[in-house]
Amino acid sequence: MNTQTQHSSKHQNYEILNLIGYGLAKFNDDFVKEFGFNSKTAFYNFCVTNKIADTIGTVKNRMDLFDPFFPNNDRKGWWQKGEVYIHRKTLIDGLFGAENVVEYADIVKLYMQDFFNIKDLDYQTKPIIKTKFKKMQETGLEAELFFKYNYNSIDIFKNGLLEDARLYGDGYDFQITN
C-alpha cells in the first residue's frame, strides 16, 4: 500500500502523511514532542530526511488539510476546501480518534518503523491498536467508514437504524432499517 501506481492520484505515502497531518492538527506541538523534537520544523525535516515527504511543504500541506477539523488549534488551514477531505478525518477518527497524543504518536511510530524502517523510535502499542492499524490498510475501509458516519445525510436512509454487518461475512456491510 506504500507504492504509487501509474493510475493513482494519491501520494505514494498517502497513509502516513494523513496520519501525520491529523496528529499535527489535532495535537499540535504535543505530537511533535512525542518524537523528541522541540519544533515542528525539526519534525518536518525528520520526515524529509526519512523520505516520508519530499519537502517540508508536503508535511505542512497535510497538516493544513486537517486543521479546519480541529478549531481549537487556532489555525485555519485549508478552510476554503470545506468538507472535501472529511473522509480522511472520518477514517482516522473511526480507528484512532479516541487515542491520546502518546497513543496516537505510537501508532505513527509503528507505521514509520514498519514501512520506512526507521529504528530507535520508542513506542508501545496495545494488540488492538496493531489490529486497527492493519485494518486501516484494507481496501474499502475508508468508504465503509465514510458511509457509516454519513448515511443519515442520504434521504432514503435518513433516520434509519444502521447495523454493522461487516464481521458476519454474509456479503454485505450494513443493514438499515427505516
Image (spheres, rainbow, N blue to C red):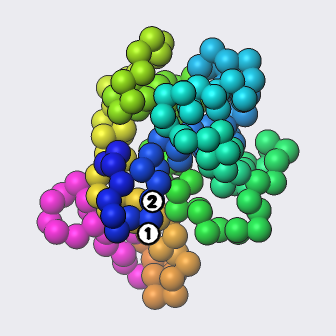
Q: Measured from the top left, where is residue 174 in percent x and y? A: 31, 69
Residue under the image location 61 percent in, 69 percent down: 84
Q: Is residue 45 left or right of residue 125?
A: right
- Span colored in magenta: 162-178
Residue 163 seen = no
Q: Given the image, on which type of amino acid does mark 2 rest? A: Lys
Tell me which numbered mark, 1 or 2, is placed earlier along the sequence: 2
**Magenta stretch containing residue 140, yes or no?**
no
Q: Is residue 173 left or right of residue 122?
A: left
Q: Which residue is mark 2?
A: 10
The one of 9 and 64 positioned closer to us in this rendering: 9
Up/down of 130 relative to 88, above or below: above
Up/down of 114 relative to 79, above or below: above
- Under circle 1, the secondary element is helix
**Which quadrant is the C terminus positioned in?**
bottom left
- Under circle 2, the secondary element is loop
Residue under the image location 44 percent in, 65 percent down: 9
Q: Given the image, on which type of amino acid does mark 1 rest? A: Phe
Up/down of 84 relative to 13, above or below: below
The one of 99 and 73 positioned closer to us in this rendering: 73
Q: Measured from the top left, where is residue 75 in percent x and y? A: 82, 47
Residue 88 seen = yes
Q: What is the number of the mark on residue 147?
A: 1
Q: Measured from the top left, where is residue 96 in percent x and y? A: 49, 40
